[in-house]
Amino acid sequence: MSASDRPLLSNARSDRVREVSALGRRSARARSGRFLVEGPQAVRELLRYAGGHTRALYVTAEAGRRHAEILDAAREAEVPTWMCTDEVLSAMADTGSPQGVLAVAEQVDVPLDQALDAVGPRDFAVVLTHVRDPGNAGTVLRGASAFGAAAVLLSAASVDVHHPKVVRSTVGALFHLPVSVGTPVQELLEACRARGIRLLAADGAGEVPLPDADLGGPHAWVLGNEAWGMPADVLAACDVGVSIPIERAESLNLAMAATVCLHASAAASTPGP
Amino acid sequence: MSASDRPLLSNARSDRVREVSALGRRSARARSGRFLVEGPQAVRELLRYAGGHTRALYVTAEAGRRHAEILDAAREAEVPTWMCTDEVLSAMADTGSPQGVLAVAEQVDVPLDQALDAVGPRDFAVVLTHVRDPGNAGTVLRGASAFGAAAVLLSAASVDVHHPKVVRSTVGALFHLPVSVGTPVQELLEACRARGIRLLAADGAGEVPLPDADLGGPHAWVLGNEAWGMPADVLAACDVGVSIPIERAESLNLAMAATVCLHASAAASTPGP
């Protein structure tokens, strides 16, 4: 079926448009179990890594011409596809400029046990607790994907990983590795420990400097809130607090600290020259 | 002089307010040689590291009570201080919420030679070229400060380092180390080479993986545009292209890549255990 044969959605006030745009809100996501994926790069990664989760694809005529490979991938994955006017696409999107491409998908998180199953004896994982800023959470997910983390576990007290801003800032990383959400943090840490995963708290006041940290076996980086770190009981439940040696205190933000820690784990798991 | 003795600015349409708020625009900054520093943390760092550059401090009564140490530091540095209504402070600020504290300062960049003088035989510097996003530039500056870079050099084709968004996202790092701006990039690279500073291009396609890169002598990380890296002639002018080994291509953004590279230089310059 060519683009011109497809039904064209042109009514920005239709029930369908309202239903899609409602997914910008947490309540609608919780009710439907679905979420928004916006922009060509994120949608491309969705179709590639989680095509079976995709329920619908919406594209403008111009974006459809520019990103023919997305329409091909959607056809391959048997994803229902609609052509839309610019107005309809804008009304559906959470962001101002999804560059003419938007998908609705089933939420991609997996049960905690399934995520932990992915953590092998030479692997590392990432635990996010009390992280509230969508951009920071997204950047950490992106780093987790880049540096080959085996799983990302978000505690109950964290930003919603299916929030459009998180999805956008992961640029597809959300679909690259198992992500688990919603477990209370102490339960989460206990589940890691029960599997022999050592817990390293990334903490500006941590007693072990990063170059001295043991990154040999299965371990998880525990990352806390961007402003005040993590609660004392979370810190106490970790095996060790690890700090990054820096010239000036408080000068790294959460995403930067996470990037350095995850890179160190990736480097440690790479066989030397 | 106590807060209550100070003159209170209450007219949001006064010439002074207009003059201050104009510094949100590049043209006004270029004309006056001044810029805006917003929020208590950035202003605290300004007064501490570049107090002599500060021309005026504006605070609301509430912020003055909360941050008495800022008023003390301003008095110490003989900075003229005005109490303002919330309305006046909002009208002056580029951001919606400068948390009641705003300063006007002389621009802090230094001549290129002076910045290069700061790069000793065991030091490293950062060169930014064609970086356009204020948040990215600010994060790189923050990383440069955290990891002890000796200087930051921005080429002529880069974002204005005195842009309020850059200043905000450096959270004071702009005042921690010499920053030079405005030199055409090839001239900048040539000046580094003339001083024996090796040029390492941070490049996703770089032929040397980061763990194999020689970070021993004086060197500079050359960081390019967030979307398309750096022009071929800039890459060619560098001594070596260095890539960060990652699981998936294109999965690190500029700020993350810079963080990893600067951290590696900091770790290399730290004496081993």
Image (spheres, coloured by chain):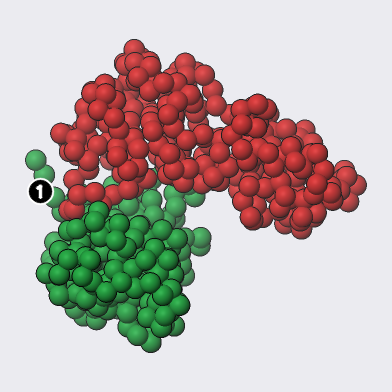
Chain colours: A green, B red
Q: Residue furthest top?
A: B194
Would residue A127 be seen by someone viewing this image from the given angle?
Answer: no
The structure residue drawn at horizontal position 13% and vertical position 50%, both measured from the top left corner, is A270
Would residue B54 be seen by someone viewing this image from the given angle?
Answer: yes
| Residue marked by disc 1 | A271
Residue A61's place in the image compared with A77, above or below, is above
**Chain to which mark 1 belongs:** A
Q: Residue furthest bottom?
A: A31
Depth order, front residue of B263/A201: B263
Give the quadrant of residue B21: top right
* Element type at mark 1: loop
Q: Position of residue A84 (x, y in %)?
A: 33, 68
The structure residue drawn at horizontal position 18% and vertical position 45%, both measured from the top left corner, is B245
Q: Position of residue B28 (x, y in %)?
A: 65, 32
The structure residue drawn at horizontal position 30% and vertical position 57%, both measured from the top left corner, is A62
Three-letter code for the amino acid on which mark 1 is drawn: Pro
Depth order, front residue of A50/B207: A50
Q: Residue furthest right?
A: B5
Q: Where does the N terminus of chain B fall, quadrant-wise?
A: top right
